[in-house]
Amino acid sequence: MTRPRMMLLGAAVLATVAIVVAWLVIDRTDDDPISGPAAQLAEEVPLADGSTTEPDEDWVTRTAADRQIPVRAMQAYARTEISQREEQPECRLRWNTLAGVGSVESAHGTLGGAGLDAAGVSSKRIIGPPLNGKDGTRAIKATKESTALHGDEKWDRAVGPFQFLTSSWDQYGGDADGDGEANPHDIDDAALGAARHLCAHERDLSGGGWVKGVFAYNNSMAYVDKVRSIADSYAK
């Protein structure tokens, strides 16, 4: 994506997409230290009356408006926090961490003029540049499975609101919305995959495990600091 095109997304998006697919594009190393404070945790998502799986609708709508997050994306983040209470309660994931990552990776599924439909699927597929070994990228050849996700028959690419590679999606992806398909282009499924990635290795994201989790998502302290800053702003 060229700089002029990025500028069209507006100042709010510019603040979040500078490293939109950096964790998948740049040839990562382990030189950066695992250090620094965790992000401030947002309040726990309240449940809807009589439900153990759905967030309070008024809370979602109000929080989305206050933080300028698309409502459909906010629903996915809130639902994922709730589901993680059951799947990995020791992780103590909060929605604002997912929102921080989702903001950096794809401006909450709106990068490049995309939007989310009622089912949470991007109206326009968000696909990263080819990982062909050029411009600091790793060289990763496409497979039949990965080509089905991004259309490139030669090189692999990151896909979806949380910019998953096929290998990572195979490890962490899931069907969050019960439609019978684990789809990285679906923000519900992608948010679940991101949560599992962040919570891997029994991390506790309420403390020191937060930095380690986000660093594992992208081995860059600049990325960690960016996500922390955005997650902190959402927690207020």
Image: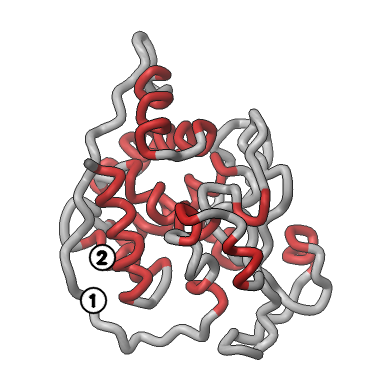
Mark 2: amino acid: Val
User: Where residue 175 sits: x, y (%)?
Assistant: 58, 40
Q: Residue at x 37, y 70 (%)?
A: 223
C-alpha distance separating marks 2 and 1: 7 Å
Toward the top, the furthest residue is: 50
Callout 2: few (<14), some (14-19), or many (20+) C-alpha neighbours within 10 Å? many
User: Where residue 38 sits: x, y (%)?
Assistant: 20, 59
User: Where residue 23 sits: x, y (%)?
Assistant: 48, 72
Mark 1: amino acid: Ile
Rendered image: mark on residue 34:
1
Is residue 56 shown above or below 34? above
| Residue 170 seen in this snapshot | no
Q: How many marks?
A: 2
Q: Nearer the viewer, residue 1 or 135?
A: 1
Instruction: State which quadrant residue 31 falls in.
Output: bottom left
Secondary structure at badge 2 equals helix
Is residue 99 shown above or below 158? above
Q: Residue at x 65, y 49 (%)?
A: 185
| Left or right placement of residue 63 versus residue 123 in this view | left
Rendered image: mark on residue 167:
none
Is residue 220 shown above or below 69? below
**Image quarter hosting the N terminus:** bottom right
Rendered image: mark on residue 211:
2
Q: Residue at x 65, y 64 (%)?
A: 5
Secondary structure at badge 1 equals loop
Instruction: State which quadrant residue 66 falls in.
Output: top left
> Do the residues bearing badges 2 and 1 touch, measured as CB atoms within 8 Å?
yes
| Left or right placement of residue 220 versus residue 135 in this view | left
**Image quarter hosting the C terminus:** top left
Disc nearer the start of the sequence (2/1): 1
| Left or right placement of residue 36 versus residue 82 in this view | left
